[in-house]
Amino acid sequence: MKLFSKPAIDIPAQLTLLKHRGLIIQDEAKAHCFLEAVSFFRLTPYMRSFQLSHDAEHGFRPGTRLKELTRLYDFDRRLRLLVIDSIERIEVATRAAISNHMGPQHGAHWYMDARFFQRDYRHQVLLDSIRSKQEKARQDHLRECQRIETSQSTDTRKVKLKNLRAKESYARHYTLTYNAPDLMPAWAAMEEITLGELSHLFKGLARDADKKAIARRMALHGPLLQSWLHTLTTIRNICAHHARLWNRELGIRPELPKTVNFLWPQYLQKPGQHARMFTVLCILNLLMRRVSPHTSWDTRLHELLSEFPEINLAAMGFPPNWKSDPFWKAPD
């Protein structure tokens, strides 16, 4: 452990530091604007690909230009947008799959019954989370009603506004309309919890038959869906915090199919680490085709990679011949 002593420096000093490290900056005015919009600290992880290894001064490889750095940053930003778009579709489909199976099988409020969950699942945490969301919705409605009361509207208009506000979310509507059960039905609750909570819920289901039935709705085996939801939760959090994604090594490595009876990349059927973004992109491509059969997501990925030919795909885990794999050819 040592004392932190790095000073905070302004943008002109940041540009001076970058030039001192060997970065070529051709237009300082544009560079200044870029650092106004994207902090030096946020840009730092993208610098590593251009810096000399084992250089304590973080020097850049000779000839490195700021434009190369900003293009990598832009590529990563657009990759995150593409990835979060697919995760949104997959997340919504997973919520629907759980609701469409569990509700008809076990009732409108099945999630309130601990029997449907494994013993080590934190069932009370789930219930407290839903209860907290309902209470927040009730308090928000109460504050809005108080503001409406102080407005200059007529009494008739105030009543109408309050009724409209009460219907703006189902959490509000349920809390203001029903007193038993105290929590909203499962199909609404599944829309309120986070992807992480949804992933834990699926993993925590007690009956393998339920897991299998839910996974079948997405044409998957239960263990694969469980593992992939866990991985996608991590990836979604990276995207949500606008963090570096493109060459990320996966901390939560997804389980891969042991036997394949569906179209799947040949490269991922071989032994290996498979701990980079290529694996995630393959999972997303497969799931997008399952939940949105007419998707153009894979085409958009091809277009993005073609627009940035300088990107080191090997650092993302792509094999050299990935384009020739039937998996990455758009289905007819």
Image: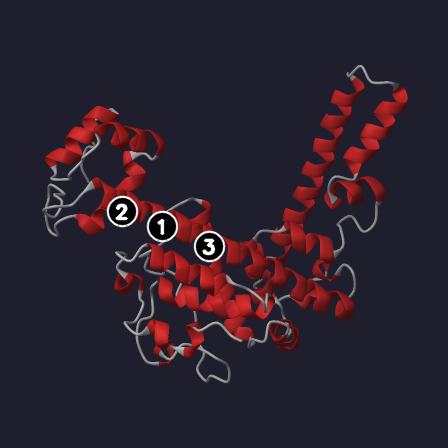
Q: In this view, does 218 lie to the left or right of 324?
A: right
- Which is nearer the N-term, disc 3 or disc 2? 2
Q: How crowded is mark 1: few (under 14 residues within 10 Å), some or many (20 or more)?
A: many
Question: Mark 3 and mark 2: span between their CA atoms?
Answer: 19 Å
Q: Which of 315 and 135 is in front in this view?
A: 315
Q: How crowded is mark 2: few (under 14 residues within 10 Å), some or many (20 or more)?
A: many
- Which is nearer the N-term, disc 1 or disc 2? 2
To which residue does mark 3 refer?
Answer: 82
Which amino acid, mark 3?
Leu
Question: Mark 1 and mark 2: span between their CA atoms?
Answer: 9 Å
Q: Which of 231 and 51 is in front in this view?
A: 51
Q: Residues within 10 Å of mark 3 (few under 14, many from 20)?
A: some
Q: Where is residue 233 in the image (x, y as percent from the top left)?
A: 49, 57
Q: Nearer the viewer, residue 226 or 216?
A: 216
To which residue does mark 2 refer?
Answer: 46
Which amino acid, mark 1?
Asp
Q: Where is residue 55 in the image (x, y as percent from the top left)?
A: 10, 47
- Which is nearer the N-term, disc 1 or disc 3? 1
Q: Which mark, by number, is residue 76?
A: 1
| Colour scheme of the picture | secondary structure
